[in-house]
Image (tube, grey):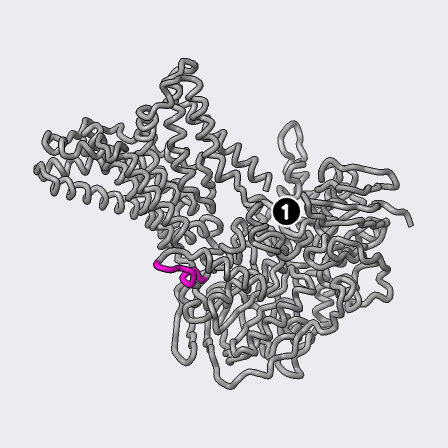
């Protein structure tokens, strides 16, 4: 290899078009064009807002998953954790019995705290127990899920107070300046996530640990703290998703959040984050979550494929995304 | 003599960048042909073209005088051209025999025939003069033994041309000597050997002919007769290299900066004691596995150990590398690729990783300050990167080491511990690194150099401590700082005797 000293920064910049970053957005545009061609009702504000609103839960969870995955970890427990937090929050609200904003705020606070604690548990077991995150979160996934079933005694946990339900309703159904609240929440979470991952030393540490844990350790990065924090962030994101989700149905069941972990991981990977760690893309994740919901929407609006096959198509998407990423890696 | 493999006017470009231009080389049966050049001179690219890993952009390869075009390494191997890679490429969880036959298992009735493979492995290892049990898991082998397994694997196929890519980079002098015995044996069997190395003394000792590359161009093909290492270095670098080592800085002040007493690392080091003065360059010599790396990793809190550490007169203990850095001590790992740099990240991310707090404003990263630091590092350390957004893994070994130095110096340490500072680094860069180390001491910092290259310790250090079997065997300084003295302390026997042991004449 012949190496010459770099001449100017501007010259270098031209090379830095990164397909890995762009591809989820290109896919998004292609899907929107395809949807428009298939059904004229697709490209309406109401349909698109509806699609993005529906993707909000997965997107919020997936922002957290971006931290865990780009730090070289994995969290399979998010779906069960969502169900547990939803169930526990409703039970707490029922127990307090009030029908005012204060009660609701305390319930929400409890949900966020529970999310943080669940994430902390995952993180501490992974770091201090030195166990593969796949195994740890497979275990906690089972634990969280069966705790919900136990709390619900196999049935449904419902928010009983109708007045409280009315106060809580806008968190899912409300709009601010014409934009549904879940979309706003999801944008705020993504923006905070992006700042945290791209602009803080914590974010840099996450990427360093995901790239090579030994190098990070030898460079004085506080491995255990950073890694545990990624799981805590994941837990808090799950709790935020739950806050938006609960008013939608007003209840939690043993099947709440089923397979959300797969959708979240799919969104993250489709968005360009490397499953082995070291590369994290928050806005890619956001695009990935919207892509999943768009595909489902287009399938419903078109008559080509049965909408019962949505899961199969989403499964195919993650495989295709990995193949695309692989081809970019070769190109480097 | 008959030419086996000939390269005629080979050029190779990657995109707009031409890394090789018009290289011709004639490899004959029964000769050891060394290819030397600085990092980035194109040695590895040439080697990969000759062994079928890459196709040349221009020019021709002739095997026995017939033009050939290899579709890949498999086809080259089928023609008897094998490459022994620089990196150890073995599956750690498989046994030696399984590794040797990986991908070409011997089968009987459709099932793998372990017994035959084991016997053949044993036979070929015996041929190489190695005593390694074919059933051992590679994980449990030393680096030197792994290298031998890798060579055994390469030599398993019928071979006419064997290429070694810096084979001694991870070997101690004694181990390197047994590798040379293997190479000489290959030569006797009329095999053509291509040999890439940075160590010019080795080239002088083993090679029959030398090809010198500089900046992707052929400088010369010469017989080794009358070609001395100093002249080789001049040809490689294009300038006079007689002053490889800088003047030793005027000397350490009397005050002790760091004192270590009775430090023990379980399984590696027993009761090591030493002290380091301000402005001193202190060397740590010994064989690989003597416990040098482990001692310092443990002192910095990177692995378990116990004993007393006194820094600037106060007793101290580090929980992790972060605390050590805060106290002004940095450690540059010998394992640059595994523990030093994030190979998949760009130069900027690598540079600032150990000192991120210096680049945060109001808890946000200051990208501009980072870019500024990168500009300065590229200037100060002469880091040669083709592009600014290159990944660290795409840099040559010498430039990686400079980047690692720049990264650790951002922590503004008072004590710098450098483990194998010039491993895998070409001679021109070596000179730069040596003078940088000397300037650190000149500035009043203290440096510890851990090295397996005795010349380096002698040329660079004020004082050298030698470790053997986890203990500090002794100290040499001043006039007594000789290769013989270090070998004696490192092995417990005098040099002639050590050579005998290596040659197996005991």
Alpha-carbon neighbours of circle 1 within 10 Å: few (<14), some, or many (≥20)?
many
State the predominant SS element of the stretch in magenta: helix
Residue in the image at 33% along x and 26% along y: A45
Residue hosting label 1: B134
Query: Quick check: B136 above or below A93?
Result: below
- Subunit of label 1: B
Furthest-right residue in this view: B1
Q: Nearer the viewer, residue B320 or A301?
A: A301
- Asked whether residue B295 is in view, the answer is no
**Viewed as shown, does residue B49 lie left or right of A33?**
right
**Viewed as shown, does residue B2 lie left or right of B465?**
right
Residue B485 location in percent, x, y? Answer: 66, 77
Q: Quadrant of residue B325?
A: bottom left
The magenta stretch is: B355-362
Q: Nearer the viewer, residue A324 or B184?
A: A324
Furthest-top residue in this view: A303
Residue A62 location in percent, x, y? Answer: 36, 38
- Asked whether residue A193 is in view, the answer is yes
Number of numbered callouts drawn? 1
Residue B98 location in percent, x, y? Answer: 62, 42
Q: Quadrant of residue B506?
A: bottom right
Q: Nearer the viewer, residue A304 or B316?
A: A304
Q: Is residue A166 magenta?
A: no
**Viewed as shown, does residue A91 lie left or right of B384?**
left
Query: Quick check: A271 above or below B378?
Result: above
**Viewed as shown, does residue A84 lie left or right of B394?**
left
Query: Quick check: B174 above or below A209?
Result: below
């Amino acid at each position: 290899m012949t190496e010459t000293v770099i001449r100017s920064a501007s010259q270098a910049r031209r090379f830095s078009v990164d397909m890995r970053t762009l591809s989820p957005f290109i896919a998004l545009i292609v899907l929107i064009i395809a949807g428009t061609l298939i059904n004229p009702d697709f490209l309406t504000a109401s349909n698109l807002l509806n699609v993005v609103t529906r993707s909000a839960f997965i997107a919020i969870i997936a922002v957290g998953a971006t931290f865990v995955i780009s730090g070289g970890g994995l969290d399979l427990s998010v779906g069960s954790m969502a169900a547990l937090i939803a169930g526990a929050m409703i039970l707490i609200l029922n127990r307090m019995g009030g029908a005012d904003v204060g009660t609701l705020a305390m319930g929400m606070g409890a949900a966020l705290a529970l999310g943080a604690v669940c994430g902390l548990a995952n993180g501490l077991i992974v770091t201090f127990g030195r166990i593969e995150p796949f195994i740890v979160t497979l275990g906690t996934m089972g634990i969280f899920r069966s705790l919900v079933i136990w709390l619900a005694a196999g049935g449904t946990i419902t928010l009983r107070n109708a007045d409280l339900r009315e106060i809580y309703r806008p968190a899912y159904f409300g709009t601010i300046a014409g934009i549904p609240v879940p979309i706003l929440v999801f944008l705020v979470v993504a923006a905070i996530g992006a700042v945290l991952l791209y602009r803080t030393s914590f974010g840099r540490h996450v990427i360093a640990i995901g790239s090579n844990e030994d190098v990070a350790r030898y460079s004085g990065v506080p491995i255990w703290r950073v890694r545990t924090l990624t799981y805590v962030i994941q837990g808090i994101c799950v709790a935020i998703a739950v806050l938006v989700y609960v008013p939608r149905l007003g209840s939690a069941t043993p099947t709440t959040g089923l397979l959300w972990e797969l959708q979240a991981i799919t969104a993250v990977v489709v968005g360009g984050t490397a499953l082995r760690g070291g590369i994290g893309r928050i806005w890619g994740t956001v695009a990935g979550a919207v892509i999943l919901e768009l595909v489902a929407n287009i399938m419903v609006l078109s008559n080509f494929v049965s909408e019962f096959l949505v899961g199969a198509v989403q499964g195919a998407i993650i495989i295709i995304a990995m193949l695309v990423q692989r081809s970019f890696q070769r190109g480097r | 003599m008959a030419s086996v493999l000939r390269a005629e006017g080979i050029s190779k470009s990657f995109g707009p960048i031409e890394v090789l231009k018009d290289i011709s080389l004639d490899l004959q049966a029964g000769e050891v042909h060394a290819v030397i050049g600085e990092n980035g001179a194109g040695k590895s690219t040439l080697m990969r073209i000759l062994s079928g890993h890459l196709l040349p952009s221009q020019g021709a390869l002739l095997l026995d005088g017939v033009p050939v075009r290899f579709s890949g390494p498999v086809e080259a191997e089928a023609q008897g051209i094998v490459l022994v890679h620089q990196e150890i490429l073995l599956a750690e969880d498989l046994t030696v025999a399984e590794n040797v036959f990986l991908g070409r298992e011997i089968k009987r009735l459709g099932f793998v025939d372990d017994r035959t493979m084991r016997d053949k492995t044993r036979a070929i290892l015996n041929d190489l003069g190695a005593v390694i049990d074919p059933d051992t898991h590679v994980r449990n082998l030393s680096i030197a033994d792994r290298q031998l397994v890798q060579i055994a694997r390469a030599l398993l196929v019928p071979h006419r041309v064997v290429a070694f890519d810096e084979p001694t980079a991870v070997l101690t002098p004694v181990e390197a000597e047994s590798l040379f015995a293997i190479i000489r044996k290959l030569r006797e069997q009329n095999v053509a050997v291509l040999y890439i190395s940075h160590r010019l003394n080795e080239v002088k000792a083993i090679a029959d002919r030398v090809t010198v590359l500089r900046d992707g161009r052929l400088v010369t093909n010469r017989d080794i007769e009358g070609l001395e290492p100093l002249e080789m270095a001049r040809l490689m670098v294009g300038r006079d290299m007689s002053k490889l080592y800088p003047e030793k800085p005027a000397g350490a002040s009397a005050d002790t900066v760091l004192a270590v007493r009775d430090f023990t690392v379980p399984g590696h080091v027993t009761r090591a004691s030493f002290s380091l003065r301000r402005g001193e360059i202190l060397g740590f010599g010994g064989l690989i596995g003597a416990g040098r790396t482990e001692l310092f990793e443990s002192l910095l809190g990177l692995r378990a150990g116990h004993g007393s550490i006194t820094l600037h007169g106060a007793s101290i203990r580090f929980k992790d590398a972060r605390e050590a850095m805060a106290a002004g001590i940095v450690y540059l790992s010998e394992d640059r690729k595994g523990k030093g740099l994030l190979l998949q990240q760009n130069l900027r991310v690598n540079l600032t990783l150990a000192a991120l707090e210096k680049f945060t404003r109001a808890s946000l990263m200051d990208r501009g300050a980072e870019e500024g630091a990168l500009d300065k590092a590229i200037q100060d350390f002469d880091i040669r990167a083709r592009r600014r957004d290159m990944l660290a893994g795409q840099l040559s070994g010498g430039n990686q080491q400079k980047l690692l130095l720049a990264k650790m110096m951002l922590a503004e340490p008072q004590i710098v511990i450098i483990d194998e500072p010039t491993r895998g680094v070409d001679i021109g860069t070596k000179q730069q690194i040596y003078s940088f180390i000397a300037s650190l001491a000149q500035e009043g910092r203290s440096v510890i150099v851990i090295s397996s290259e005795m010349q380096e310790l002698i040329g660079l250090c004020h004082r050298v401590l030698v470790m053997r079997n986890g203990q500090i065997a002794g100290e040499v300084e001043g006039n007594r700082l000789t290769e013989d003295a270090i070998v004696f302390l490192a092995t417990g026997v005098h040099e002639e005797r050590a050579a005998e042991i290596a040659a197996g004449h005991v």
